[in-house]
Amino acid sequence: MNKIIEIKNLNKSYSVATNFWGREQKFVHALNGINLEICENEILGLVGESGCGKSTLGKCVLKLEPITEGEILFKGKDISVLDKNETKEFRKKTSLIFQNPYMSLNPRMKIYDILREPFIVNSIRDKKIIRERINEVLNLIKLDQSDLAKYPHEFSGGQRQRIAIARAIMMNPDFIVADEPVSALDVSIQSQIINMIIDLKQKMNLTMLFVSHDLNIVKYVSDRVAVMYLGEIVEIGNKDELFENPKHPYTKALLSVVPKINDKGEKKIILQDDLPSPYELPKGCKFHTRCPFALERCKTEEPKYYSDTETHKTKCFLCE
Ligand code: SF4
C-alpha cells in the first residue's frame, strides 16, 4: 500500500523557561521518538489520556507546529524542506477537522462563504467550479442547498460538525487529521458523524489520523490503532489485534475501564497517580511509575518494541 505519511524518530519539545542570559533551561517533552506510517485509504486511530501529546502530533504532521528532531514525510517528501509553492500544495492536499464545531465556524459568515473559503485560500475564483464542488460535497454530507444561505447558529452541533467536515474535504485532500471530532457532541449525534466519516473514507479514498480519547469510537472507526503515553507510542496494531489481544499494561488498563454491553465482570485496572510531568520524564520505561506489573529493571532500562505479528508492536519488557 502507498504510504501517505511516514514519521521517523520524531521529537517535539517546547522551551518553557529561560535563564538570566536567555538560554533555554526547561523543556516540555511533548513527543518522544515517534515512528509511524499511515497508508492510503487507512484510518489510524490515536488514543491516550489528555496531555499525552496526541494533538501535538496531529499539528506536527500538518506542519502547523515545527518539530524539534526527526522527519515527517508526506508522499515521500520531507515536509520541513518544502518551499513556498510546495507548502501551498501541501496545505491544499491536507486538512484538519477541529474538535469543537461551535468554535471552528465563523458565526458571521454564511455557510456558502464558509465552504467557499478553501477555494479563496487556493486562489480558485471560477464561480462555476466552486458552485459545482460545493453542491457535490453538500450531497456527500447530506445537507440541503437552502442551508447555504444560513448562518452557523441556525444549525445543531451535529450539523455544524458536518459543515466543518465539508470544508475539510472540499479540496479533495489526500490526508486529514481529525482531532477529537465528536467529543464535543451529544452521544446520540456522535454515531451519525462517525458513520459519515466511514462513508466518506470509502467514497473519497480518505486517509486519516483520527485522534480520540474514546476507545469505543476509535475501535469503530479505525483500521489500525496506536496507543500513546507521555509522548511515546507504547503499542500499535491492527484494530482487532489491539482490542482482542492487548499487550501493553497501559492499553490493558485503558480497555478494562471501557463500558461494555456484555460486561462479564472482568477486573478493572485502575491506574494510580496522574500522568507524570512532561518536564521531567521518568527514567527507564516511562510508564513504570503507574504500571501494576513494573519490574525492577523497568525503573532504569528503556524497553524496545517487541512484535508478536508483523503489524503488532509493543514497548514493554513483558513482551520480550
Ligand atoms: Fe510496565 Fe515494565 Fe512493561 Fe513498562 S516495561 S509497561 S513498567 S512491565
Image (cartoon, helix red, strand yellow):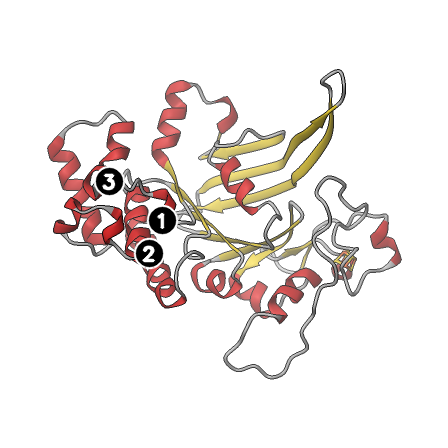
Residue at screen point 65% across, 33% down: 13
Separation of residues labelled 3 and 1 (CA atoms)? 16 Å
Image vertical order of residue 100 relative to residue 312, above or below: above
Q: Amino acid at mark 3?
A: Leu
Q: Specify the label residue 157 is tagged with.
A: 2
Q: Secondary structure at mark 2?
A: helix
- Within 10 Å of the Cα at label 3, are there few (<14), some (14-19), or many (20+) other Cα atoms? many
Asked if labels 3 and 2 touch by Cβ distance under 8 angstroms, the answer is: no
Asked whether the residues under the numbered discs 3 and 1 touch, taking CB atoms below 8 Å apart as contact, a structural biologist would say: no
Q: CA distance from mark 2 to mark 3?
A: 17 Å
Q: Judge left or right: residue 311 versus residue 217.
A: right
Q: Secondary structure at mark 1?
A: helix
What's the amino acid at mark 1? Tyr
Q: Residue at x 32, y 48 (%)?
A: 165
Q: Amino acid at mark 2?
A: Gly
Query: Where in the figure is residue 159, as x and y percent of width and height?
Result: 28, 55
Where's ligand 1: which quadrant?
Answer: bottom right
- Label 1, residues with CA under 10 Å away: few <14, some 14-19, many ≥20: many
Q: Quadrant of residue 306?
A: bottom right
Q: Residue 195: where, in percent of width, then height?
A: 34, 62
Identify the residue position indicated by label 1 in the image.
102
